[in-house]
């Protein structure tokens, strides 16, 4: 995987002897802070610098571009089948010009068939699999996506940095953001998992 930012300043790994030699050049430091404290401070500062770099990464460098979508006129049965087939909990809804017009979330789908969206002992996949095993239950899937989708959609434009995306997710208490261009056409989806993965990758690089 390509690095998400310029790491030229991080290429030279410092060791304890480097800090000892540096402190010997400044004797006044020795009476104020230990080498171990200085190294710990350096590592902490380096971590914060790496986080700051990641936060400035634009969402298009992280988002998923292969997206399963539906149209406003897609039937609920077909939408449910897509969710089950791809193991996804939400479907962006786009018109004939690929402009984002809504989202059909798992809560919307379950509500459409009269099932509580937060069943204590059953997740979305178990619910859908149960319904499709008993085809008669599918009679409850009436209508098309546009009758049950959520609109307008909370999303961001290309060029939005991760820091802003994370802040918006936190404020709106959502797990994903649709990414559109200036014309409102869907370009990708970024999820909390995508963001967490980037931070984990960088954490492993720092540990290594």
Image (cartoon, helix red, strand yellow):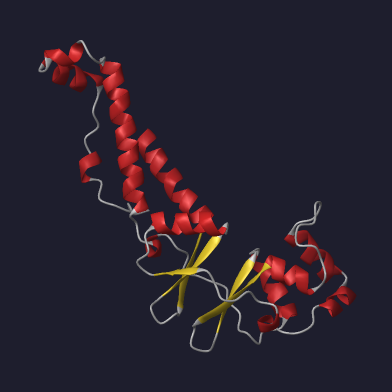
Compared to residue 93, the image places residue 127 above or below, namely above
- The image shows residue 15 at horizontal and vertical percentages of 25, 24
Residue 33 on image: x %, y %: 25, 16
Camera sees residue 143: yes
State whether residue 184 is above or below residue 207. below
Residue 208 makes an appearance in the image: no
Q: To which quarter of the image does residue 32 belong?
A: top left
The residue lying furthest to the top in this view is: 31
Expressed as whole percent of the image width and height from the top left, the position of residue 186 reads 47, 76
Q: Nearer the viewer, residue 158 or 77?
A: 158
Examine the rendered structure and indicate whether residue 206 appears above or below residue 23.
below
Where residue 51 sits, quadrant-wise, is: top left
Q: Residue at x 31, y 49 (%)?
A: 53
Tell me the residue at 67%/73% (across/down): 82
Task: Determine the residue located farthest toward the front in the rendered image.
Answer: 171
Residue name at image x 75 percent, y 62 percent: 117
Q: Report the number of numbered marks.
A: 0
Q: Nearer the viewer, residue 76 or 31?
A: 31
Residue at point 83%, 69% (across, down): 131
């Amino acid at each position: 995987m390509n690095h998400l930012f310029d790491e030229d300043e991080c290429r030279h790994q410092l060791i304890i002897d480097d800090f000892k030699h540096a402190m010997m050049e400044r004797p006044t430091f020795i009476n104020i802070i230990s080498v171990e404290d200085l190294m710990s401070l350096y590592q902490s500062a380096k971590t914060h610098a790496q986080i700051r770099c990641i936060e400035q990464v634009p969402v298009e460098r992280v988002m998923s571009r292969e997206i399963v979508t539906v149209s406003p006129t897609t039937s609920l049965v077909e939408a449910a089948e897509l969710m089950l087939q791809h193991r996804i909990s939400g479907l962006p809804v786009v018109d004939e010009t690929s402009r984002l017009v809504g989202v059909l979330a798992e809560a919307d789908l379950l509500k459409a068939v009269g099932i509580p969206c937060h069943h204590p002992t059953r997740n979305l996949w178990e619910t859908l699999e149960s319904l499709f095993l008993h085809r008669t239950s599918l009679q409850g899937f009436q209508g098309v996506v546009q009758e049950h989708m959520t609109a307008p959609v909370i999303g961001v434009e290309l060029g939005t940095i991760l820091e802003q995306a994370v802040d918006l997710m936190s404020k709106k208490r959502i797990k994903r953001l649709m990414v559109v261009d200036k014309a409102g056409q869907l370009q990708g989806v970024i999820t909390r998992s995508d963001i967490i993965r980037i931070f984990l990758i960088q954490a492993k690089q720092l540990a290594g």
